[in-house]
Image (tube, rainbow, N blue to C red):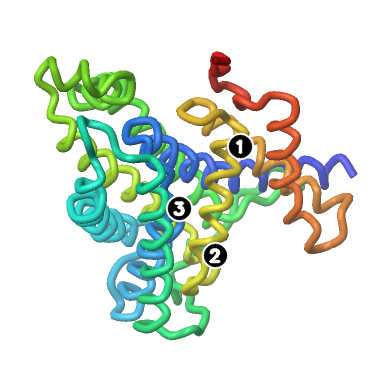
């Protein structure tokens, strides 16, 4: 029993890295732009299908496919931010309701575009799995899942360092705090919005390329991962970078451990249940700031 708990906990940590990356990238877009991006999962879908296309023509590998996926999805994010989001920006702020409605329409468009181009069949990256495993006593860690965890941690850490130690990261934090003051001090808010959406989309695309060897790519996969991203953000705290990371790992571990006690298929309710529990006990999230009442 103890070995089972340890095994599922480790598997949960591996899955949690992916959830943390998704929540972190979604929180980045909301924190800087105040856009509730319902199409975030579709950015992951684009990254997954980029990996599938590369594998189909014999290009790329378990890690090499991540770089092209980042480039493709970054470009898509930049185009979306320039063409669809910028017109909704007034005085350095994106209209929140219109931004959310726009992203909902974008989600429907992208998922149906993928369906029209690639068809409804489930697709997988062929022959690019990382073979082998690491054995620690009776505990076996699959190589591909270690790649997913490692890739997620590297990307999340790189984002943290970028926001903390670069001038561009400082500008993004300034826009998140007060776009009017940032603009008055010479920061180009539209440019920061463009970079932020491109960066957040790129991280989601990288997540899609990382997971494709162990799961299937299909047109509607974005909805599932959008839900996971929102659950992670709500549990961790809207706008909290560290909260998204913490919540991602907690969600992954809780969902994995639930397999021991719940019938197969019922572990899908763990995430929504934790989200509802968080909203009841701590509405601002684990590391979010409590909003002042009017």
Q: Quadrant of residue 60?
A: bottom left
Residue wearing tag 3: 38
Of the residues tagged 1 and 3, which is closer to the observer? 3
For the residues labelled 2 and 1, the Cα–Cα distance comes to 19 Å
Q: Residue at x 31, y 72 (%)?
A: 54
Q: Residue at x 49, y 41 (%)?
A: 23
Horizontally, residue 257 falls left or right of residue 215, namely: right
For the residues labelled 1 and 3, the Cα–Cα distance comes to 22 Å
Residue wearing tag 1: 249
Q: Residue at x 29, y 38 (%)?
A: 94
For the residues labelled 2 and 3, the Cα–Cα distance comes to 25 Å
User: Which quarter of the figure is the N terminus placed in?
Assistant: top right
Is 222 above or below relative to 32? below
Observer-nearest residue: 286 or 107? 107
Is 139 above or below relative to 41? above
Q: Under tag 1, what secondary structure?
A: helix
Q: In which quarter of the image is residue 286?
A: top right
Q: Under tag 3, what secondary structure?
A: loop
Of the residues tagged 2 and 1, which is closer to the observer? 1
Q: Where is residue 163 in the image (x, y as percent from the top left)?
A: 30, 25
Q: Quadrant of residue 195?
A: top left
Marks 2 and 3, the one that precedes in the sequence: 3
Observer-nearest residue: 89 or 66? 89
Of the residues tagged 2 and 3, which is closer to the observer? 3
Q: How crowded is mark 2: few (under 14 residues within 10 Å), some or many (20 or more)?
A: some
Q: Residues within 10 Å of mark 3 (few under 14, many from 20)?
A: many
Q: Which residue is drawn at 44% across and 73% down?
A: 125
Q: How crowded is mark 1: few (under 14 residues within 10 Å), some or many (20 or more)?
A: many
Residue 214, label in figure: 2
């Amino acid at each position: 029993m103890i070995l089972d708990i340890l095994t599922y906990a480790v598997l949960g940590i591996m899955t949690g890295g992916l959830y943390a990356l998704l929540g972190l990238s979604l929180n980045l877009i909301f924190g800087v732009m105040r856009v509730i991006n319902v199409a975030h999962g579709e950015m992951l879908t684009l990254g997954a299908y980029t990996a599938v296309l590369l594998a189909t023509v014999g290009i790329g590998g378990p890690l090499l496919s991540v770089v092209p996926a980042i480039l493709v999805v970054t470009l898509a994010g930049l185009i979306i931010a320039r063409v669809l989001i910028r017109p909704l920006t007034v005085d350095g702020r994106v209209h929140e309701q219109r931004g959310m409605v726009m992203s909902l329409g974008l989600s429907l468009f992208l998922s149906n575009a993928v369906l029209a181009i690639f068809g409804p069949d489930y697709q997988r990256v062929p022959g690019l799995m990382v073979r082998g495993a690491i054995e620690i006593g009776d505990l076996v860690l699959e190589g591909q899942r270690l790649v997913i965890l490692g890739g997620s941690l590297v990307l999340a850490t790189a984002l943290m360092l970028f926001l903390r130690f670069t001038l561009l990261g400082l500008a993004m934090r300034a826009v998140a705090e007060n776009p009017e003051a940032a603009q008055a001090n010479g920061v180009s808010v539209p440019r920061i919005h463009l970079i932020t959406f491109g960066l957040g989309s790129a991280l989601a695309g990288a997540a899609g390329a990382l997971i494709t060897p162990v799961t299937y790519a299909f047109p509607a996969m974005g909805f599932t991962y959008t839900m996971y991203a929102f659950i992670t953000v709500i549990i961790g705290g809207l706008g909290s970078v560290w909260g998204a990371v913490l919540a991602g790992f907690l969600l992954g571990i809780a969902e994995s451990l639930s397999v021991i006690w719940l019938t197969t298929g019922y572990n899908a309710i763990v995430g929504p249940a934790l989200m509802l529990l968080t909203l009841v006990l701590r509405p601002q999230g684990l590391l979010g700031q409590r909003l002042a009442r009017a």
